Image (cartoon, rainbow, N blue to C red):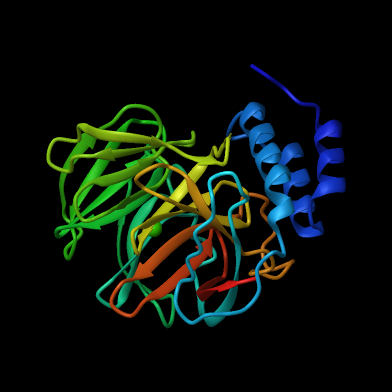
Amino acid sequence: MCTVTPLAAAFVFSVTLPQNACMTLVVNLFGPRRKSVFSRAGLILILALSLPSFACQSGTVANLPVEKTPANEPVPIYGYEVVHTWPHDSNAYTQGLVFHDGKLMESTGQEGRSSLRRVELETGKVLQKVDVPRPYFGEGITLLKGKIYQLTWQHQLGFIYEAWTFEKIGQFNYQGEGWGLTNDGQSLILSDGTNRIRFLDPDNFQVLKTIAVFDGSMPVIEINELEYVQGEVFANIWHADRIARIDPQTGRIVGWIDLTGLLARGEVHDEEAVLNGIAYDETNGRLFVTGKLWPKLFEIRVTRK
Ligand SMILES: [Ca+2]
């Protein structure tokens, strides 16, 4: 295993990253470790190398901006505008987020605190909830053809619920860890903390294809919560204030959405209270984001920087 000393890594941040990102990532180095030092070092390198493409865009558009860039040029960095701010359960350790039929559906993690819930957008009120029993740790969810699929982190086991009643109607297995989940209308799309994303047949859970996510020549690891948005896969990156926009055909990063500053400092105190949770209202073109233990959920509009 490759390692990097906290001191050396902190120096890299201090000279290359904006203050918010610097503080967040330095804290991460010294905090409790859920994943490997190796993977943190990889994330550091990716963020540092992609930084020169900041501040190269300008202007604002109402719809999702898409820019084509040659493969050898830095991908665009997008900004955001907050359209609405809604309450969010600050005890919800958000691991999966979906919008359907006017309501949010949310998966929460941590052993003994994991759940699947239906949430009223405007109030954050939990309308319906089923608990995920110990020892399972809830992770990503997606809704496909009337069924909700929910991953667990390390048990290689997923649960299937009827979408309206939350009745558990089945379960499935997969290899490796389960982090994020979404779908393209045909396949379940699963991240596992590496730079791989697998496409699974929802009928038999066989792997239909696997893509490897790269920003240029750099693998992008710790891909977390997912959302399929207008033909792209949007992805949280664990402990990053950025959302990756991924081409599901090639795995290539086609853009980053920089959400630095979305939640004001001091609104959360747990260092694991990081940006995680993307939901897309396909009917109305609304994009929602939140984080683990965040007191707020935001509707945002993606903008050119
Ligand atoms: Ca999602």
Q: Looking at the picture, tell me which residue is in the foreground, 160 or 285.
A: 285
Say above or below: 141 vs 33.
below
Pinpoint residue 221: horizontal percent, then vertical percent: 54, 37
Pinpoint residue 76: horizontal percent, then vertical percent: 59, 59
- Which residue lies at the image location 33% right of the left edge and 62% below the top edge? 117
The quadrant of the picture showing ligand 1 is bottom left
Residue furthest out toward the top: 1
Pinpoint residue 99: horizontal percent, then vertical percent: 33, 68
Can residue 31 be seen in this snapshot? no
Q: Quadrant of residue 166?
A: bottom left
Pinpoint residue 70: horizontal percent, then vertical percent: 54, 50
Can residue 117 be seen in this snapshot? yes
Say above or below: 276 vs 205.
below
Number of marks in picture: 0
- Which residue lies at the image location 33% right of the left edge and 47% below the top edge? 132
- Which residue lies at the image location 33% right of the left edge and 34% below the top edge? 210
Left or right, residue 105 beside residue 40: left
The quarter in which the C terminus is drawn is bottom right
Q: Quadrant of residue 10?
A: top right
Left or right, residue 249 beside residue 95: left
The quarter in which the N terminus is drawn is top right
